[in-house]
Amino acid sequence: MTIGVDDDESAFSRLEDNKGLAESWLRICGRLKGEVGEVEYRTWLTQIALGPIDGDEITLLLPTRFLRDWVRSQYGDRLNELWHNEVPALRRVELQVARPGDPAPLQLAEVTPTPTASAPATEESSPASRPVAEVRSDLVTALDSRFTFDTFVVGKPNEFAYACARRVAEKPSSVGFNPLFLYGGVGLGKTHLMHAIGAELVKSGNVSVAYMSAEKFMYRFIAAIRSQSTIEFKEQLRSVDVLMIDDLQFLIGKDNTQEEFFHTFNALVDAGRQIVVSADKSPSDLSGLEDRLRTRLGCGMVADIHATTFELRISILEAKAAASGVVVPAKVLEFLAHKITSNVRELEGALNRLIAHANLFGRPVTLEATQDVLHDILKAHDRRVTIEEIQKKVAEHWNIRLTDMSSARRARNVARPRQVAMYLAKQLTSRSLPEIGRKFGNRDHTTVMHAVNRVTELMERDAAFAEDVELMRRMLES
């Protein structure tokens, strides 16, 4: 990414002045924020850190490859223009992945321009006069300080849910975002986003927040009935600005608790208060909930978190490894991302165990050590997929007969699924090319090789086709 050249010596001297450079970067951040909006800016651009300067080139650092590639493709040209406007002598802006010890991101509030004139502090700007956020200790499960927006790794499967959560944290009760319903499988980040919303709201300093699991909601409701204090319980819940309930599926089959939640829900929404709910299924699929509650839950913003992709798992592992300060080779991260696909929680647990082993024994992390230390976890995930199972699943997905997998038919609607099945057989089994060919009507190994190459090529060119193949892989590996 190259921009124009201006041999301005004063501009280069500015590059050597860290304060001047920081102020230039903050002005650029301010312009970007004005152009793309608060939500998009905080989602994609706040994690950029200033890197080193080498001659007429400046480096910007991002925590993961995913973020680096996204920022490069979406904002690279604009970053070049803005830097060139600030410092005309700059010829190149390079985006790289940060390493342990690199600078942290510089926030807009960290460098304040020198004021032109001093002004007395007004009552409105006085810190003591600002409203203070309140986390209701009697209503809240402790927020985990590790679960913030900054530590949430964003990728294609979760970017929509992340953006929705950011929007609610910045502007509670926004039209169309109340309630916010987050759903997805176990260990994909729902609770992380809930805690991040709570942390951001508390930091904003002007709302009262109540966060609890659906289970705790039920137990507190039962306790209120037993102690004859249900009126107090209702008033406490309905006095908060933001109510967050995690794992709502726990209320399935608990009719009285559902009814109380329904009335609390209505009271808060009618009063313009924000509700955030998470569950393992979408509102329409929570068949054990009352129809009126499912309808109300679906009337706001419903955001799902998909199963992780290989790229997202790599990004998560890179971020966690960098934060730990332990050097974990790329081949080890790729090995873990391939082997542990079920949920992020288990993936992080495996990496934490590996890092702890390295710290305790002072040994470097290697692929061999990884296989030894995590042998029990890897064994549990080492499900053997058969070629027959692949053929059956692919045939069902593309609606062809199972016998077509080994037939001589060459029609495209048959040949393409057959090639996909060969590709998956190569990726998911340890069978050789000749063995795979024999399972597909005694075809030659070169036919299998051609199928693998052809599917790989199509996946690079056609995103929809690549998504279909990846879906088949996830179904077979689950």
Image (spheres, grey):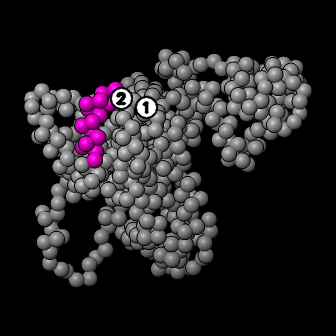
* Segment colored magenta: 250-266
314 vs 128: above or below: above
Residue 286 forms part of the magenta stretch: no
Q: Are marks 1 and 2 in contact (CB under 8 Å)?
A: yes
Q: Is 143 left or right of 85, judged from the image as shown?
A: left
* Residue 411, horizontal then vertical, whole percent: 87, 36
Q: Which mark is residue 131?
A: none
Magenta stretch encompasses residue 251:
yes
Distance from Cα at disc 1 to Cα at disc 2:
8 Å
Front residue of 468 and 288: 288
**From the viewer's perspective, is residue 66 above or below residue 131?**
above
Residue of label 1: 287
Q: Quadrant of residue 332?
A: top right
Mark 2: amino acid: Ile
Identity of the residue furthest to the bottom in this view: 117
| Mark 2: secondary structure | loop
Viewer can see residue 430: no
For mark 2, does the 10 Å Cα neighbourhood hold few (<14), some (14 to 19), or many (20 or more) residues?
some
> Residue at horizontal 35%, vertical 65%?
108
* Whole-percent x, y for residue 132 in the image: 17, 56
Q: Which residue is mark 2?
A: 252
- Residue 416 in the image: state x and y as whole percent: 80, 36
Q: Nearer the viewer, residue 181 or 263?
A: 263
Q: Residue at x 43, y 31 (%)?
A: 287
Compared to 410, does 60 lie above or below?
below
Residue beneath the point at 24% across and 34% down = 217
How crowded pointer 1 is (Cα within 10 Å; few <14, some 14-19, many 20+) is rated as: some
